Image: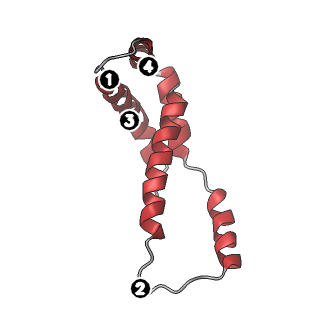
């Protein structure tokens, strides 16, 4: 569940960033397709250590918040007409994950 949430948020931020990058500036020239493919291959090799660190925190340290989030999610999905969201639970869960992961993530910053 936690990894799925991280993946959805990562996809969202990646999509937003990609849309911003897709807006070409007038001064930039178009690169040949072979160069673009080569750059994409290089980018795929990079792995963000923050993702693994946050997943570990979610699974090991923030289990109570994850349980509350899962409980809320089940409750909301079981109802057909509801205005309830799990926004507070999501915020609590991500706050816990960020707090847990912060020290370890900053060790990887150069």
Q: Residue at x 60, y 82 (%)?
A: 31
Label located before the other in sequence (1 or 2)? 2
Residue 8 drawn above or below residue 56: below
Determine contact: label 1, label 3, CB under 8 Å.
no
Label located before the other in sequence (1 or 3)? 1
Eye-nearest disc, 1 or 3: 1
Cα distance in 3D space between marks 1 and 2: 43 Å
Cα distance in 3D space between marks 1 and 3: 21 Å
- Circle 1: element type: loop
Which residue lies under the disc numbered 4? 66
Describe residue 41's horizontal placement relative to residue 73 as left or right.
Answer: right
Residue 58 drawn above or below residue 77: below
Label located before the other in sequence (4 or 2)? 2
Few, some or many C-alpha atoms within 10 Å of disc 2 (few <14, some 14-19, many ≥20)? few
Label located before the other in sequence (3 or 4)? 4
Residue 85 in view: yes
Determine contact: label 3, label 4, CB under 8 Å.
no
Which residue lies under the disc numbered 3? 98
Cα distance in 3D space between marks 3 and 4: 13 Å
Describe residue 100's horizontal placement relative to residue 32 as left or right.
Answer: left
Which residue lies under the disc numbered 1? 85
């Amino acid at each position: 569940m936690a990894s799925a949430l991280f993946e959805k948020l990562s996809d969202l931020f990646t999509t937003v960033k990609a849309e911003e990058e897709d807006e070409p500036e007038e001064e930039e020239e178009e690169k040949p397709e072979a160069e673009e493919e080569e750059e994409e291959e290089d980018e795929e090799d990079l792995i963000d250590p923050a993702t693994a660190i946050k997943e570990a925190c979610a699974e090991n340290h923030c289990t109570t918040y994850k349980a509350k989030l899962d409980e809320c999610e089940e409750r909301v999905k079981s109802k057909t007409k509801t205005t309830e969201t799990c926004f507070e639970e999501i915020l609590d869960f991500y706050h816990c994950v960020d707090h847990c992961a912060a020290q370890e993530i900053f060790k990887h910053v150069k």
